[in-house]
Amino acid sequence: MTMQRGEERASQSVEDFLKAMYRLQREGGRVATNALADELAISAPAVTDMAQRLHDDGTVDYVKYRGMRLTPKGERVALLMLRRHRLIEAYLVQDLGYALHEVHDEAEALEHSVSDRFVEAISLKLGHPRFDPHGDPIPNLDGVMAERDLQPLTQLALHRPAVVRRFLMHEPALLQATQARGLTMGAALEVTARAPFEGTLEVKVAARPAQTLGYKMAAAILVEIVENLC
């Protein structure tokens, strides 16, 4: 499923539609109209209209009352857009000094306007990174993404050493809060206590005193287990 350079670009609304479908599809099979409407903040009739158009275009498999899923052609476009977005985020952080909470909206705007040549120049300059600043995998030109064995902080066993590897969040306020608490990419930590029923967690980050995290924040932080904290 190689993503060829120079293919005709779709419109911004189509690219956003297919990218959103890809995210939702990975969470559970065919995508419901209402779920996609909520994701894109548009009406359900607008989603249906776009789905029917893209069905005719061959990028979406749409069946009335059964939702939709991407065809191989549609998945190719979605992965190309993810590659663009994540490489731009990496460039903004590594070369332009953007903070993590600033890059998502900037990349959303830029991904539709820059050329394929520009995106591949970014990839070359950054040494073809496999992950963006949030820890999200960057698809290569064949649509392949690196995989890691990660788990949410909410599932990490007590006193098990781990490091932060991915943030499943883009809300600026939430990202700022994680960074302020020392929960940065690669930070060493362990969970020292956990309240039941999706309650708070007590987390010790590196040499900092233990601190309390809410369940929502902790669930959006993915970690990798390590043998020892250094």
Image (cartoon, helix red, strand yellow):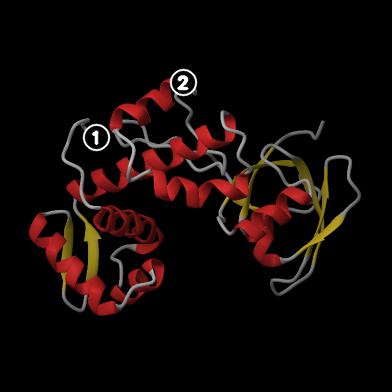
- Graded by Cα atoms within 10 Å as few (under 14), some (14 to 19) or many (20 or more), the crowding at tag 2 reads few
Residue 82 in the image, given as x and y percentages of width and height: 38, 44
Q: How far across and down, in percent of the image, does residue 134 sit?
A: 56, 44
The secondary element bearing badge 2 is classed as: helix
Q: SS class of the residue under badge 1?
A: loop
**Which quarter of the rendered picture does the N terminus lie within?**
top left
Q: Where residue 81 sits in the image (x, y, percent)?
A: 33, 44
The type of residue carrying mark 2 is Lys
The amino acid type found where label 1 is placed reads Met
Residue ID at (23%, 33%): 2
Name the image quarter holding residue 58: bottom left
Location of residue 224 in the rendering, given as x and y in whole percent from the top left corner:
64, 41
Left or right: 140 in relation to 51: right
Which residue does the image show at 57% across and 56% down from the upper left?
169
Residue annotated with mark 1:
3
* Quadrant of the image occupied by residue 93: top right
Q: Distance between the residues labelled 2 and 1?
A: 20 Å
Left or right of residue 12: residue 163: right
Q: Mark 2 points at which residue?
A: 125
Quadrant housing residue 40: bottom left
